[in-house]
Image: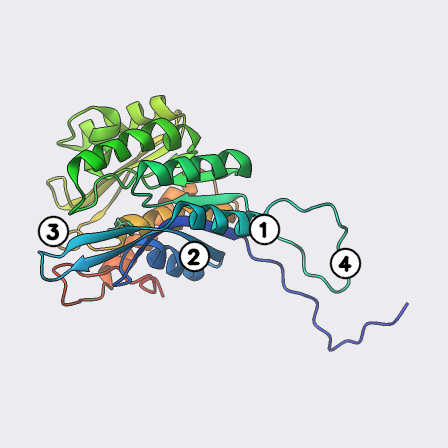
Amino acid sequence: MTPVSADVQSPAAAPAVVLTIAGSEATGGAGAQADLKTFQELGVFGIANLTCIVSFDPNDSWNHRFVPVDQQVIADQLEATTAAYGPASGVPADEASVPERPVLDTVKIGMLGSPATIGTVAAALKNGRFRNVVLDPVLICKGQEPGHALDTDQALKSQILPLATFVTPNQFEAESLSGLAITDVESLKAAAVRIHELSGAAVLAKGGVRLEGPDAVDVYYDGETLEVLSAPKVGEVAVSGAGCSLAAAVTAELAKGSTPLEAARAAKDFVTAGIRNRVASGAPFDALWQGGPR
Ligand code: PXL
C-alpha cells in the first residue's frame, strides 16, 4: 500500500444536500434566492429547481408578474437533480479518494403556481423517496388571476399536502387549509391541530405580525407536542422572504438531523435575527437578511 503523506488532508465530511423546488423572485428577497441563502448560512449544500419566475411590477403597485417554467424543463431539472444526488447506484466508492457521497432526502416546496406544475412536482415526490418534505403552501400570488389561483390551491391541497412531512402555513394559508377563522393564538392553535389531522405532517402555523399583540407568535403541532413560539415583533409590516427563509431553515435543520420541534425553534430564531437585520429597498417592503444571525 502507498503510505499516505501527513500533509494530505482527508476529505471533509460531506454536507447534507437539500433541494428547493421554488420560484425565482427577481429582487432576491423571497423564493429560491432566499432558500439558497438560508441553506448556505446553515451549512447545507443547496440546490434550486425553478418552477416559475416572478418579477414585481413597480408600475402596477408591485403586483407579481408570473411566468411559469415549461413543464418539461421542470421535469428535466428534477431528473438531473435526483440522478445526481438520489440514492447511490450500487457502484462502490474508492474510499481513499472519493468523499462520502451525500444522499438527497430532504426537499422544500415553495411556490408552484399552477395545477400543471403541481402535477409534475407531485410525480417527482412520489418517485423520490424523500424522508423530509417541507411544504411552504404558497397559495395566492398577488396579481394572479383569481379563478386560476383557486385551481392551484385545490391541486396543492389534494396532491402536495398529503406528501408533506412538515408544513408552514401563514395565517391566510392556515385559514384556507383548516377552514377555520384565525383571529388570535387560540384559533391559530386550533388551525394547527386541524392541519395536522388533515395532513399527518408537523405544522408550524405562523401568526407573525398579523395577529394583534406585542409578539410575533407561531404555533407548532406534531400530533403530540403543541408549542407556542414567540418573539417580540420587529415593526408591524411583514418582511419579504420571512416565510421562505423560515421553511428553508426548517429544511436545513431537518437535513442535519434535528427533530421537527428543534428545527422549528432554530428556524424561528434564524428568521427573527434576519428580520432584525433586514435590508431596505425601493419596494414597499424590506427583505430579510439571512446573514442576520452572524
Ligand atoms: O413569499 C412567497 C413567495 C414565494 N416564492 C416566490 C415569490 C413569493 C412572494 O413574492 O415571489 C417566487
In the image, residue 3 sits, relative to residue 25, either above or below, namely below
Q: Residues within 10 Å of mark 4 (few under 14, many from 20)?
A: few
Distance CA(mark 4)–CA(mark 3): 54 Å
Q: Amino acid at mark 4?
A: Glu
Q: Secondary structure at mark 3?
A: loop
Read off the residue under disc 1: 85
Q: Residues within 10 Å of mark 2 (few under 14, many from 20)?
A: many
User: 245 or 282, which is in the foreground?
Assistant: 282
Q: Residues within 10 Å of mark 3 (few under 14, many from 20)?
A: some
Comes first in the chain, label 3 or label 2:
2
Q: Secondary structure at mark 2?
A: helix
Distance CA(mark 1)–CA(mark 3): 41 Å
Q: CB at mark 2 closer than 8 A to ligand 1?
A: no
Read off the residue under disc 4: 95
Q: Secondary structure at mark 1?
A: helix
Residue 227: % across, % down: 32, 34
Q: Secondary structure at mark 4?
A: loop
Q: Is residue 154 left or right of residue 60?
A: right
Comes first in the chain, label 4 or label 2:
2
Classify the position of the N terminus by image quarter: bottom right
Classify the position of the C terminus by image quarter: bottom left
